[in-house]
Amino acid sequence: MTSLFADTSALIKWYIAETHSEKVDSLFVTQSEVAISRLTGVEFCSALGRRRRNKQISRKLEKDTLELFYSHQLSGHLRVLPLNDTHCAEAEHLMHTLPKIPLRALDAMQLAAAKLANMAEFASADKIQISAAKAIGLKIHDFS
């Protein structure tokens, strides 16, 4: 079973070439599977759409990238963790217990998914989320 959880901010770098993409690839190819939450698909589609609208990627690259993302889920390389009310409650708890970290709602949900699945490692490209992940004891892979 995997111990690595990837936030969307790190995962997108595996599919779209940008700063630290090589480092993400080096980490992900060593894993038999990488855990993501159900929320990741929504964030991933949003991130690709934003890049297409900003003319950073073509519609074809967006489509091809989504197909590859879904194929990685079907093959089991990306293991999708479900979300439920317990995750919402844990995300709220994290925001209350980490009051000095300006954690955003969806980032808290991603951390809650990792924490409740007993992940040991957390990959992210978001400095605030990384601070929170460190505070709850996760080993960090920082791609910011």
Image (cartoon, rainbow, N blue to C red):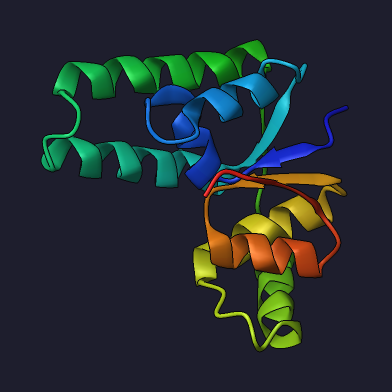
Residue at left 32%, top 45%?
A: 46
Residue at left 45%, top 35%?
A: 12
Q: Is residue 84 visible?
A: no
The answer to whether residue 53 is left or right of residue 86 is left
Location of residue 99 with respect to 57 vertically, above or below: below
Classify residue 111 by image quadrant: bottom right
Residue at left 62%, top 80%?
A: 101
The image position of residue 63, as x and y in percent, is 27, 19
The image position of residue 27, as x and y in percent, is 68, 25
Given residues 1 and 84, the one toward you in this image is 1
Residue at left 68%, top 17%?
A: 76
The image position of residue 16, as x and y in percent, is 37, 26
Quadrant assignment for the N terminus: top right
Given residues 80 and 121, the one toward you in this image is 121
Q: How many marks?
A: 0
Classify residue 73 by image quadrant: top right
Given residues 46 and 132, the one toward you in this image is 132
Location of residue 114 with respect to 72 vertically, above or below: below
The image position of residue 121, as x and y in percent, is 79, 44
Q: Is residue 104 visible?
A: yes
The answer to whether residue 65 is left or right of residue 122 is left
Classify residue 59 by image quadrant: top left
The answer to whether residue 144 is left or right of residue 54 is right
The answer to whether residue 55 is left or right of residue 81 is left
